[in-house]
Image: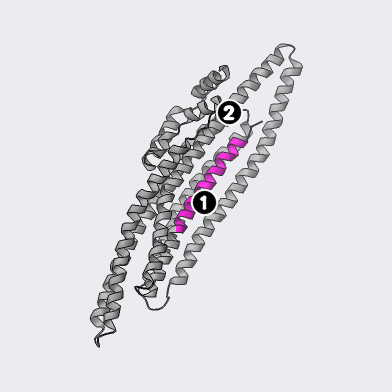
Amino acid sequence: MEYQQILEEQFNNVVDQESLSSIMEQAGDVTAGIASNFSAENILAAIADGRSIFDDQAIIEDIRSLFFLEMKSALILCVQILTICIVIGLLKGLSSSFSSKSVSEISMMICSMVMIGICITNFKTTYQLAADSVNTMSNTMEILMPVMIGILISTGSAASGTILSPMITGSITGVSFILKTFVLPALFAATILTLINCLTEKDYVNKLAKLIRNAAVTLTGLLLVILAGIINLQGLLTDASDGLLLSTARYSLSTFIPIVGGFTSDTVELFLRCMSTIKSVVGVFGIIIILILLLTPLIKIMVIALIYKITGALAEPMTDSKISAGLNEMGSCVISIGAIMFFTALLFIMFISTIIKIGGS
């Protein structure tokens, strides 16, 4: 009990409560209140009491409710697209029954453009959702990192905190800029090209659309590997240096200061253990928030991708094969958006994990 009180006092003294409250407010707005079930204080209390920090039943219920809500909205999109596909199929059948095909072909073109308009509107919503999610995750990291770096330095890992702080902050800003300026717009352009390809008899831009989409996903994957590798290697090197300094300081206190030195060393050890626990608590809190910020929009995006894939399969016997293939490619484009979000969240979680790992001994 005494240890728990010490932890709570140190937590209130060291951690910037306004920063954590700001993170909770941002996450609560984006995740429909799911993030409000978690807080750093609750995680600290659960760890001190030896309890689980998760309520499995509540988490499953929230995910289930969100999934069925998004599925209901996506089914409306499916019905709209299939209705237009049926009309296009009927017009195609009528055009082959009459000598004059111009009216039917014009009608088919109009229906195809209406369907493309619906798909573009839906994809814009998905695109904006992904952009907002990446932006919120970046803002969360920018608020969380100074708090964690400050605690890291308090544990005696001064070299790690001093070196990693600008590296991680710069990486977060750089990744956010690259994703919002190049990667996500490239995916949007690839999707537009995919839809335009549905209106042409030949595949004029289909390969170009796939190339752009694959390049965007590959670039994000390379960013993940390179930045995570650099941060982890730097963390290992600085952690070794800080560990040597701390061991030297403990030995000096115990050896060169008679009687009092041993008590002082034990007090310092307790303080460092408390700070290390608090660092882990804040880090776990950050990881949970990032996961929630990822999971909430990712469920919506994956449901939409599934609906596009199913709609493309159902539309194949009803309408032109180009439209069916285009709907299937739309599903792939939406999946690529989800993959970008997943890579971003994974990179940020690696950053947090690196800080948690440093100075743990």
The C terminus is located in which quarter?
Answer: top right
Q: Earlier in the sequence, mark 2 or mark 1?
A: 2
Q: Amino acid at mark 2?
A: Thr
Q: Secondary structure at mark 2?
A: helix
Q: Is residue 112 shown to the viewer in this render?
A: no
Q: Position of residue 281 (x, y in %)?
A: 54, 31
Q: Residue at x 25, y 75 (%)?
A: 107
Q: Residue at x 38, y 45 (%)?
A: 65
Name the residue at the bottom extreme: 99
Q: Secondary structure at mark 1?
A: helix
Asked where in the image residue 21 lies, by quadrant, the reply is: top left
In the rendered picture of this protein, how many numbered marks are placed on residues?
A: 2
Q: Which mark is residue 277?
A: 2
Q: Residues within 10 Å of mark 2 (few under 14, many from 20)?
A: many
Asked where in the image residue 102 lies, by quadrant, the reply is: bottom left
Q: Position of residue 341 (x, y in %)?
A: 47, 51
Q: Position of residue 143 (x, y in %)?
A: 46, 36
Asked whether disc 2 touches disc 1, contact meaning CB atoms under 8 Å apart, the reply is: no
When the figure is inspected, residue 17 is found, relative to residue 33, above or below; the finding is above
Q: Amino acid at mark 1?
A: Phe
Over which residues does the magenta segment extend? Answer: 335-357
